Amino acid sequence: MHDSVNKLDVLLEKIGRALDRLAPESVPFPDFQNYLAFRWERSGESGRLAPVSHPHLFDLDQLVGIDDIRDEVIRNTTQFVRGLPANNVLLWGERGCGKSSLVKGLLGPFAAQGLRVIELKRWDIMSLPQITTVLREAPFRFILFCDDLSFDEGEGDFRALKTLLDGDIEERPANVLIYATSNRRHLLPERVRDTRGDDEIHPEEAVGEKLALSDRFGLTLGFYSLDQDEYLAVVRHYASQRNLDVTDEVLRDKALKWAMSTARRSGRSARQFIDDLEGRLGLLRGKRTRKPRHESRRDMEPLK
């Protein structure tokens, strides 16, 4: 009898340890007071909001050539942080035109008013119910930032996003909005057969399914490739801010050559060109200071 009791105790202890391993670990409530940005870190079926110690506080004044779009996003965000009705935002269009920087830059003017930004990857969308449960009662305003968002054929994650955007049987938190960026206007691939109806008895339903997700963003703003004058205006803006010692003629010539070599005119391309130019000028200033014996006129020529 004694042996049976001991065996039972051992068995119960093993069961208890197994249950402890299966039980989810206690996750501390996010420190929204001292951190401005977070990212969702999944762990099995659960996850946590991990603080970002050094968020990229982009300066909105650095965004040149998209004044109308920037002003619209700022207006919408101002309404949101003041507790007024505001819309989810989809920023779509050309690469490198400032979509992501515009969202990240909102922390600068709005963090002191209670705005926090949470970065989500596309595969985190299925965790949205857990995330919004954490955020619902917090005395802050949250932008869920989905960068470079798009879906392929057959993926069901976009339906979870549609549900959150419109709300299901549970009311959507009033202190949460989604700001997404994408190279695709409707977030899903669109094919010729969708309009021809090759595979669908009712092709309009296939098209409607693809439009339904982007339609749930109340504010949809498109970014387009810069024309030459706009591109040069961005280049000159960056050059002026960094006090680069180069004539406008040289700046213009080299900026256009850079755009031709990269096959794009965008804010990102302009910034990359200025980074390259500033670095080259810095090297030349170093050479002039040290006056190395091997310096030649050919070394100086590219940046005269």
Image (cartoon, grey):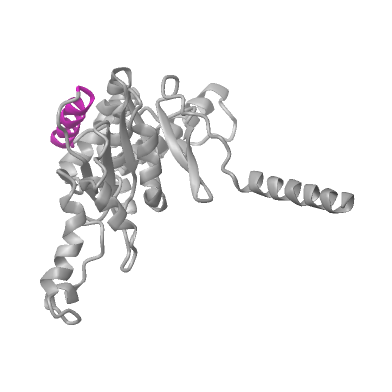
Q: Locate residue 65 relative to residue 100 in the image: left or right.
A: left
Q: Is residue 80 magenta?
A: yes
Residue found farthest to the front: 1
Q: Locate residue 275 relative to residue 44 in the image: left or right.
A: left
- Residue at horizontal 40 percent and vertical 34 percent from the top: 134
Q: Locate residue 67 relative to residue 135 in the image: left or right.
A: left
Q: Quadrant of residue 147?
A: top left
Whether residue 137 can be seen here:
yes
| Residue 114 percent coordinates (x, y) | 31, 21
| Residue 69 percent coordinates (x, y) | 16, 37
| Residue 41 percent coordinates (x, y) | 49, 42
Of 285 and 83, the residue lying toward us: 83
Of 283 and 130, the residue lying toward us: 130
Total labels drawn: 0
Q: Quadrant of residue 209?
A: bottom left
Quadrant occupied by the C terminus: top left
What secondary structure is the magenta-colored segment mainly? helix
Whether residue 247 can be seen here:
no
Q: Is residue 10 magenta?
A: no
Of 207 and 102, the residue lying toward us: 207
Above-or-below relation of 36 to 160: above
- Residue at horizontal 16 percent and vertical 40 percent from the top: 229
The magenta region covers 66-82
Q: Quadrant of residue 105?
A: top left
Above-or-below relation of 1 to 103: below
Q: Locate residue 83 relative to residue 140 in the image: left or right.
A: left
| Residue 101 percent coordinates (x, y) | 31, 36
- Residue at horizontal 59 percent and vertical 44 percent from the top: 23
